[in-house]
Image (cartoon, grey):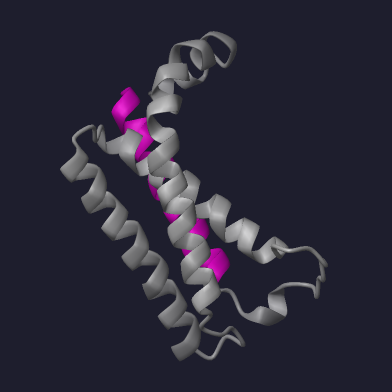
Amino acid sequence: MTRGKIALVLAVLWTLLISTSCLLPASSFKAFSFDTIISIDKLVHFTLYSVFFVLWSLALGLKKKRQLFILMAVTITFGVLIEILQATMSLGRSYELDDIIANTIGSVLGLVMLPFIRRMMPLLKKYLPFLNKVY
């Protein structure tokens, strides 16, 4: 498998992880409370969408600003669609504007971190050789 195909497979798998974990019935998750300024749920959304953006941009080899902003629009739309599906499907889940905001901030962070990740890739490949097969 070529590097591009492996990166694409990882991006698709990450998309499936987001889709399935966000569309599982609420009863699948244990009750959890975390008394902080930012709840653990928002940190999860933030992280999922940061990685989502980075994986897809690397898998598709996007470098131009226009391409990256189109991907940003797609990731934000995907997050909104997931929230709408949670509201409309009988999963015990609910639509939360805060989740959309966390998804969007995560995607923006992915965009901001992308140049750094690309610069660090040679160093990461040196210490994590399996990345040579991915990117």
**Is 78 in front, or is 106?**
106
Magenta residue span = 1-22
- Quadrant containing the N terminus is top left
Q: Measured from the top left, where is residue 106 in percent x and y? A: 49, 53
Q: Residue at x 49, y 78 (%)?
A: 97
Q: Is residue 134 above or below residue 7?
A: above
**Is 127 in front, or is 112?**
112
Left or right: residue 119 compared with residue 93: left
> Hey, which residue is sitting farthest top in the picture?
126
Left or right: residue 46 compared with residue 15: right
**Is 104 in front, or is 89?**
104
Q: Is residue 43 magenta?
A: no
Question: Image quadrant of residue 59?
Answer: top left
- Quadrant containing the C terminus is top left
Q: Residue at x 66, y 80 (%)?
A: 26
Q: Is residue 38 visible?
A: yes
